[in-house]
Structures are given as C-alpha cells and as structure tokens.
Image (tube, helix red, strand yellow):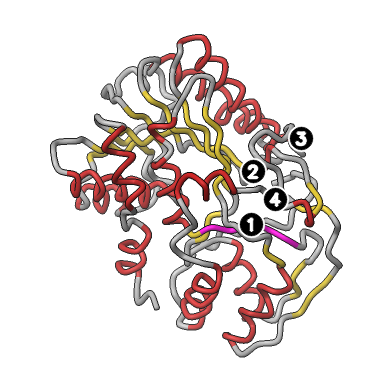
C-alpha cells in the first residue's frame, strides 16, 4: 500500500520505459505551463526523473501562479526550475524561456457555469497565444474526453476519429481549444500531440475517491452516469509524455484512459467491501455515458502499469486511514455539461 504523501508522489512520478525512450527521441528542454494543477507536479517530476536517468543536461521548467503553499519549493527541491506568473498578464508568454518541448496543462473546468467568458478565454484564447509564441517547439497539450458525445456503454467508447459532440459550454470551449491548436499547427507546421484524458486517478482526488467518500459517509451514489473510464495518474502522465515524439502537423490525437468500461455500481460495491460499508444508490444506469476508447494508447505504449483492482485497494486503504484529499469532486455524474 502507499504509506504517505511522499510515497504517493514517488509512485506517481516513477518513470516507464516508454517515457525514457520518448525523451531520448524528443530531445531538448521541457517547459510545463500549468504545473500547479493536480497533474502538473507529477508530470514535471516524471520528466525530471526520466531525463536524469537518460543522462545529459536537460532543463525542466514549471510555470504557474502557485496558489498552493509550498508547491514551488517542492518542485525546486525535485530539480525543476519554476516561474511564478499569470499567463494572462501582458508579456507573460514573451518572458518565458525558449524550449524545444512545451507542455500545456492550463485549463478551466469547475466554476465554468456562471463564468463562461473566463472559461473560453482560458481554454481557447491562451492556446492561440501559446502557439504564436512557440511556433518552432514541439507542443504537448491536454484536452478531455468531454469533447465526445455520450455513447452507448456496449460500444466501448469513441476512438480518436469519432465525431465530436461536446455537451455544454465547458466541453465546447475544449473543442475550441483543439481547433485553435490545429489551426496554428497547420499554419506554422508546429508539431502537436493532443491528449484527450478522462479520468485520471490520484489518491487525493478522482472518481474512486468521490465514490469511496460517499460510501464512507453513507451518502447515496448517483447511478445515472453509470459507467466511466479511469486511469492511474502516473500512467496518464507517462502516456502523455511518451506521445511527445509522435507530435505532428496536423496534431496527433490520443485518448488516454483505462482499458475498461467501469461500472459505478461495481466500484462502489468493491470499495464498500474493503471499507466495511454497504453503499447506497439512487437513480438508475442510463444507456449512454461519457466514455473513451484507449486501444491506440495500449497499442503504442502497452497497458497501464497500475490496474483497476490495485487502484481500488490503494484508494480504500488511503481513505480508511484518513489520507489527505483535495476536496475537489470530479463530478463525473454530470450529464448536462454544467460544471
């Protein structure tokens, strides 16, 4: 089991052979924009550890507003250079160091309803500014499976060539982000790798934490979004970084998620068994859910290292011991696109 936060951070940033091989091909410095988010520290440290194992000088730089106390210092202790700034500030992008590889993790989701202009500016304006600032870099950008429509559970989920069907303004702004990246990629021949992610799992947040906390509290679990995909955050970061040398113009698109279509009812029951609680349910499973098919990622990089049963065991143990959580629900159950 994962003992504490230090142990968790080590596991989340443990390099894989595919990351080592990718960074040997995608040479040069790496600039991570939005490093202060939930996945940013793990990805930046993973890049640092893989680069160190490969040998030779390579600078890993993280950029964020750093609202979380102590995060900037922790990143620096891991050998990651940091810049504290707001990318909306005039001249912010121009003041950043050049880098052969740029990872764009800046996004806005929760709080979108009621703040739609800020959501669109973050998700679609900043990508254009970034692509104009770094036209000769290799770009890795995160998107979301929310750009897909809800699909039948027995379909296995949309593949990368499935027609978009975003529901709600958040998802629409994410499709706009993709289109902006594609426009500048084609215009300037900038190689881009576009990662459609859902849902990453960390012991401090994620679908399993959301369900497990409700089981512990005796709160009913909504079954209307009855099925999801999940992937360990360390595997998600590894697959994303492994896609760097696959960046292309027009962009290379990759679904990053777990291989299974996972039943929420089954997750609750398996977590409940480990937590010694009987889960409560409300509603019923609908025929359509927000899903993605990650068969291409498995073909390229192999299966995730951490399987579903291990994630369930780790999460139950973490919650039972009162491990730290972010208190930021995934809201996987939302069906109308309002976040």
- Seen in the image, is 189 located left or right of residue 99? right
Q: Are marks 2 and 1 in contact (CB under 8 Å)?
A: yes
User: Where is mark 2, residue-wise?
Assistant: 145
Q: Are marks 1 and 3 in contact (CB under 8 Å)?
A: no
Disc 1 versus disc 3: distance between alpha carbons?
A: 18 Å
Q: Residues within 10 Å of mark 2 (few under 14, many from 20)?
A: many
User: Where is mark 1, residue-wise?
Assistant: 229
- Seen in the image, is 147 located left or right of residue 80? right
Front residue of 198 and 91 = 198
- Seen in the image, is 183 located left or right of residue 190? right
Query: In x, y percent, where is residue 56?
Result: 13, 38
Q: Are marks 4 and 2 in contact (CB under 8 Å)?
A: yes
Location of the N terminus (image quadrant): bottom left
The part of the image, by quadrant, that contains residue 139 is: top left
In the picture shown, does residue 218 fall above or below 17?
below
Residue in the image at 61% along x and 79% along y = 271
Farthest residue, direction front: 299
Secondary structure, mark 3, is: loop
Disc 4 versus disc 1: distance between alpha carbons?
A: 6 Å
Secondary structure, mark 1, is: loop
Residue in the image at 64% along x and 43% along y = 145
Start and end of the magenta stretch? 227-231
Farthest residue, direction bottom: 276
Q: Are marks 3 and 4 in contact (CB under 8 Å)?
A: no
Q: Which label sits on residue 165?
A: 3
Query: In x, y percent, where is residue 96?
Result: 30, 24
The part of the image, by quadrant, that contains residue 279 is: bottom right
Mark 3 and mark 2 lie on one chain; the one further toward the N terminus is 2
Task: State whether residue 92 appears in this view.
Answer: no
Mark 3 and mark 4 lie on one chain; the one further toward the N terminus is 3
Q: Main secondary structure of the magenta part?
A: strand
């Amino acid at each position: 089991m994962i003992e504490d936060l230090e142990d968790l951070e080590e596991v989340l940033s443990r390099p894989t052979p595919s990351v080592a091989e990718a960074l040997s091909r995608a040479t040069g410095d790496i600039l991570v924009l939005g490093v202060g988010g939930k996945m940013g520290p793990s990805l930046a440290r993973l890049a640092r550890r893989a680069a160190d194992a490969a040998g030779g000088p390579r600078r890993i730089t993280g950029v964020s507003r750093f609202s979380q106390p102590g995060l900037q210092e922790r990143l620096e202790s891991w050998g990651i250079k940091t810049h504290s700034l707001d990318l909306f500030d005039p001249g912010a992008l121009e003041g950043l160091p050049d880098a052969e590889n740029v990872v764009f993790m800046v996004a806005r989701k929760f709080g979108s309803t009621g703040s739609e202009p800020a959501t669109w500016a973050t998700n679609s304006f900043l990508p254009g500014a970034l692509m104009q600032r770094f036209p000769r870099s290799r770009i890795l950008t995160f998107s979301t499976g929310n750009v897909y429509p809800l699909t039948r559970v027995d379909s296995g989920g949309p593949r990368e060539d499935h027609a978009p069907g975003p529901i709600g303004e958040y998802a629409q702004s994410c499709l706009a982000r993709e289109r902006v990246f594609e426009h500048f990629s084609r215009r300037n021949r900038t190689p881009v790798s576009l990662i459609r992610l859902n849902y990453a799992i960390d012991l401090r947040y994620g679908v399993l934490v959301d369900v497990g906390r409700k089981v512990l509290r005796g709160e009913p679990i909504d079954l209307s979004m009855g099925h999801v995909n999940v992937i360990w955050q360390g595997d998600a970061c590894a697959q994303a970084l492994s896609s760097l040398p696959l960046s292309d113009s027009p962009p290379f698109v990759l679904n990053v998620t777990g291989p299974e279509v996972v039943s929420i009812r089954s997750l609750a029951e398996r977590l409940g068994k480990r937590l010694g609680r009987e889960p409560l349910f409300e509603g019923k499973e609908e025929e359509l859910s927000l899903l993605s098919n990650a068969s291409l990622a498995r073909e390229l990089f192999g299966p995730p290292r951490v399987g579903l049963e291990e994630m369930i065991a780790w999460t139950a143990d973490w919650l039972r011991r009162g491990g730290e959580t972010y208190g930021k629900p995934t809201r996987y159950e939302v069906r109308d696109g309002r976040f």
